[in-house]
Each structure stands twice: as C-alpha cells, then as structure tokens.
Image (cartoon, coloured by chain):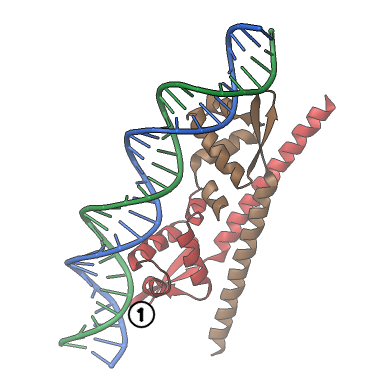
Chain colours: A red, B brown, C green, D blue
Amino acid sequence: MPVFAALGDDTRWSILAALGQGDASASGLASRLPVSRQAIAKHLTILEEVGLVEPLRVGREVRYRVVGAQLEATARRLDELGFAWDRRLAAIKGIAERL
Amino acid sequence: MPVFAALGDDTRWSILAALGQGDASASGLASRLPVSRQAIAKHLTILEEVGLVEPLRVGREVRYRVVGAQLEATARRLDELGFAWDRRLAAIKGIAERL
DNA sequence: TCCTAATGCAACCCGCGAGTTGCAGTAGCG
DNA sequence: CGCTACTGCAACTCGCGGGTTGCATTAGGA
C-alpha cells in the first residue's frame, strides 16, 4: 500500500496542508516550508505517483493541486477493511460462544 | 500521523492479514511469515502503539487481535479531510469563475 | 532577443528503521 | 517440581529514504 507510505511522512503532510490553501509550485512551497526546493520536488513526485496530487503547468512553473478523491477512495478501502475485520471478529466470537 | 507510518510497511500488512484470520502470538506468526520472531514482536509493538492491535495474555503466550475500530476511525478522518479539500477546491474554482 | 527565474538531474551524506542473532528470564504444562 | 517453550532485552548490520548542495537546462516575461 504505497499510498500509506506516502502519508507516513510529516513533511508530506505539511506539503498537503500547504497545497490545501491553494495550488503552488515546488519553489513556492519551498519559500513557506523549512526544506529545500529539491526535497519538496521529490516529495511531490512521490505524492503524484500515488495519485494524491496532480501537476499542471502554468506559464513557466509547475503548480500542484491536491486530489481529494484519492483520499476518499483510500478512506473507503480502509473503512471496508475495518468493517470486514469487525465482522470476522464478531463471527469468531459467536462461534466461540456457541461451543 | 503515526498510524499511516505504521500502515506504510508491507510486513505489518502481512501481520495484520494473518491476524485477520484469527488471533495469534508472535511465535505463531513467525512460523507463518518469512521473518524472525523478534522482528514480528517489534512490529506488533508498533501496531499496538497506534491502536491497530491489542494484546491479551492466554496462558503463557501473548496473543494479538486486530482492532477494526481503529481502522474505521482512521478511515473516517481521511474521508473528512478529502471531503474538505474537495469543497475548498470547488470554492476556489467558483471564485475564479466569478471573476 | 536577452536575462531571469523556474525546473530537472546527479551525486553525496546521514540517520533511522527493518531485520538478524544471541542470550537471559519466566511462566505453565505435565 | 522440573523442563520446555514462549517472551523480553540488547547489540549489531545494512539498506533505504529524506535532505542537501551544485550544476545544467529551459522556458517566459520585459
């Protein structure tokens, strides 16, 4: 699940939060965050690979935008998984009580 | 978000999947997975710290159980976040179109 | 068209996390 | 009550990921 690995880093959350207040380029983000532009560029590549962010060229810069749909899709998968586990646990508990 | 860091590792997913088929101890998991017992113990500690798993002593062994509720809670937070981002993007787009 | 500012690429450092081995301790089962 | 098996702790290796610096390149704006 590479999307969780992507969400596991604090710096990437900072980037996502910054992008949540409006699209921005790597350079723009670097001026607001305490890391270099290249580090941010790497993070943006990772975020793009898992679909959490998408690039769009504006003039001579590359702006990035958060893709909320990807977060929702991930949330849905997590929820189903948790639900399935709960059902299974309930089933096991039921079987145990029946013995 | 330490819970995402916890979910970012493949081995931990293997452990969660194995636990999904019934509670098990570190030793029991080690016999099924291609890693040592100590490695699994470390992973179980991490999973326990973020509330994805809970220990319960059974005889002389410590069995672990998946906590589905934690997954659902995480899913809910993710979903709200994605939703908020979508709303914000829609608002920004609306403002831009109005100019 | 020129010059600036933005991106892209490459090499490098470093710390942390995943994994291993070894050993000590301890709690139950028989 | 003794032995076995399971857990806990410690030390160590190693590869990867996050971060940096430096340079080349290129695309626009004035």
**Residue shown at 73%/37% (left/top)?**
A89
The residue type indicated by label 1 comes to Gly
The picture quadrant where one finds residue B88 is: bottom right
Above or below residue B90? Residue B83 is above
The picture quadrant where one finds residue B48 is: top right
Observer-nearest residue: C3 or A76? C3
Image coords of residue B43 (percent x, y)? 53, 38
Above or below residue B83? Residue B37 is above
**Residue shown at 53%/85% (left/top)?**
B96
**Residue shown at 64%/25% (left/top)?**
B61
Above or below residue D9? Residue A85 is below
Quadrant (top left, top right, bottom left, bottom right) of the N terminus of chain B: bottom right
Q: Which residue in the protein does label 1 denote? A: A59
- Assess disc 1: are there few (<14), some (14-19) or many (≥20) residues with their C-alpha within 10 Å of its C-alpha: few
A96 left or right of A61?
A: right
Numbered disc 1: what chain?
Answer: A
**Residue shown at 74%/41% (left/top)?**
A87
Image coords of residue C13 (percent x, y)? 26, 52
Dot 1: element = loop
Query: Which residue is situated farthest in the right direction here?
Result: A98
| Count of numbered labels shown in the rendering | 1
Image coords of residue B79 (percent x, y)? 63, 61
Above or below residue A97? Residue A74 is below
Observer-nearest residue: B90 or D6? D6
Image coords of residue C4 (percent x, y)? 25, 83
